[in-house]
Image: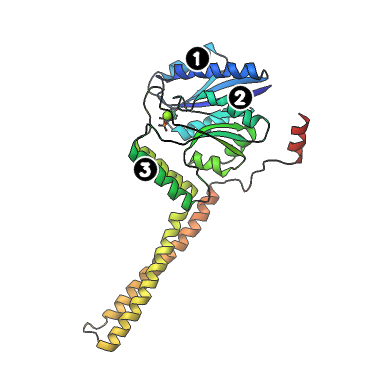
């Protein structure tokens, strides 16, 4: 028997929940007929919804033994929802997907096929178009991925989504990252493992409206940069070095000028040189502080030093099963 947990973060999703439930049931039935050893649990996370989402979940849980839910005391955001889901899921395989059918349940059988033999640890979708999204939003998104991939060692794939079919091993690895400020796109990528991408065209929301405003997304992208890059902290060092260099050149110029032509304001050259040089030095030292701060920051996150994917024990037990 293999249990598949399906985690669905929901924030004000009364309009799509019934549709989602209907769709996912069809897919679960289909998968059970193909693979009789599969069982399912649906784990909904009600992220402090203000509409009838919780009432719908209660009703579903009463009728259907496979339905579980966790209701938050207030809105904590989708990241917190996904974390709660991963932490509480009991499955051998874990799926994370949106409630709005933008992550089509029809992909699940294919995803399971990729993951079940142990060749891949994760199957996920990558949208190749941003159809149905505003031009400005797409442009900003593309710029974000460009900058992010320049300044961060963790690769953030453009178009990758939080629609994931993962093995228990990968889920445990994700849970071993205990950081509070969670940026899932980075975390999924940071843990590594063998990931299979399935490309597809963007699908629009089945009903309801998106909870993400432009500014919300903008803040979220900054979150991503600060969580997975310390480049901004190194900026002071760079500015300091440039400023010191400029000071040095100015000193030389001022000294030569004073020697050749004299200086009507006594003491001016000395003050100018001192100002530029000290300013640069200060920035440079702030940069050094920044370097130590960035190391401390990374230590605080208590990220694992390494993650194992396989050893002889795992390999042998897989061969035997
Ligand atoms: N969501 C959530 N908490 C929030 C915002 C969103 O749990 O604070 C859920 C939402 O119910 C949906 C998923 O996250 O299942 C994606 O949200 P949405 O469709 O609004 O985002 P988009 O698809 O536009 O990125
Ligand atoms: Mg959506």
**How far, Cα to Cα, is label 1 from label 3?**
40 Å
Labels 2 and 1: the sequence-earlier one = 2
The answer to whether the residues at label 3 and label 2 have Cβ atoms under 8 Å apart is: no
| For residue 166, above or below residue 243 | above
Residue 300 appears in view: yes
Query: Residue 175, position in %: x, y?
Result: 58, 37
* Quadrant position of the C terminus in the picture: top right
Query: Residue 46, position in %: x, y?
Result: 46, 25
Identify which residue is drawn at 41% across, 41% down.
220
| For residue 281, above or below residue 189 | below
Name the residue nearer the viewer: 132 or 295. 132
SS at badge 2: strand
Identify which residue is drawn at 63% across, 28% down.
113
Q: Does residue 269 appear to the left or right of 48 in the view shown?
A: left
Q: Most extreme residue toward the top, as rendered?
A: 63
Does the beta carbon of the residue at mark 1 sit less than 8 Å from ligand 1? no
| For residue 58, above or below residue 265 | above
Residue on which the image places disc 2: 4
Residue on which the image places disc 1: 60
SS at badge 1: helix
Q: Does residue 28 appear to the left or right of 224 in the view shown?
A: right
The image quadrant where one finds ligand 1 is top left
Residue on which the image places disc 3: 139
* Quadrant position of the N terminus in the picture: top right
């Amino acid at each position: 028997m293999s249990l598949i947990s399906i985690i669905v973060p929901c924030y004000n999703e009364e309009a799509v929940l019934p549709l989602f439930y209907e769709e996912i049931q069809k897919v679960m039935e289909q998968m059970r007929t193909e693979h009789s050893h599969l069982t399912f649990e649906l784990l909904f996370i009600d992220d402090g919804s203000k509409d009838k989402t919780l009432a719908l979940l209660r009703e579903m849980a009463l009728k259907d033994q496979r339905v579980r839910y966790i209701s938050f005391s207030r809105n904590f955001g989708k990241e917190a929802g996904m974390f709660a889901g991963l932490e509480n899921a009991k499955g051998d395989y874990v799926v994370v997907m949106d409630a709005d059918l933008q992550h089509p349940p029809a992909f699940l059988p294919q995803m399971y096929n990729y993951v079940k033999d142990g060749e891949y640890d994760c199957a996920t979708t990558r949208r190749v178009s941003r159809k149905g999204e505003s031009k400005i939003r797409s442009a900003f998104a593309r710029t974000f991925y460009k900058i992010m991939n320049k300044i961060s060692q963790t690769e953030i794939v453009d178009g990758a989504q939080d629609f994931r079919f993962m093995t228990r091993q990968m889920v445990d690895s994700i849970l071993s990252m205990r950081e509070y400020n969670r940026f899932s796109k980075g975390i999924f990528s940071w843990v590594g493992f063998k990931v299979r991408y399935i490309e597809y065209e963007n699908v629009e929301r089945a009903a309801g409206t998106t909870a993400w405003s432009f500014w919300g997304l903008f803040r979220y992208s900054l979150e991503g940069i600060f969580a997975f890059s310390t480049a901004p902290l190194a900026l002071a060092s760079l500015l300091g070095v440039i400023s010191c260099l400029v000071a040095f050149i100015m000193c030389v110029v001022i000294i030569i000028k004073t020697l050749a032509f004299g200086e009507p304001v006594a003491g001016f050259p000395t003050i100018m040189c001192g100002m530029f040089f000290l300013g640069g030095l200060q920035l440079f030292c702030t940069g050094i502080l920044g370097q130590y701060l960035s190391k401390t920051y990374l230590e605080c996150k208590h990220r694992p030093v390494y993650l194992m994917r396989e050893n002889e024990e795992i390999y042998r037990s897989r061969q035997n099963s």
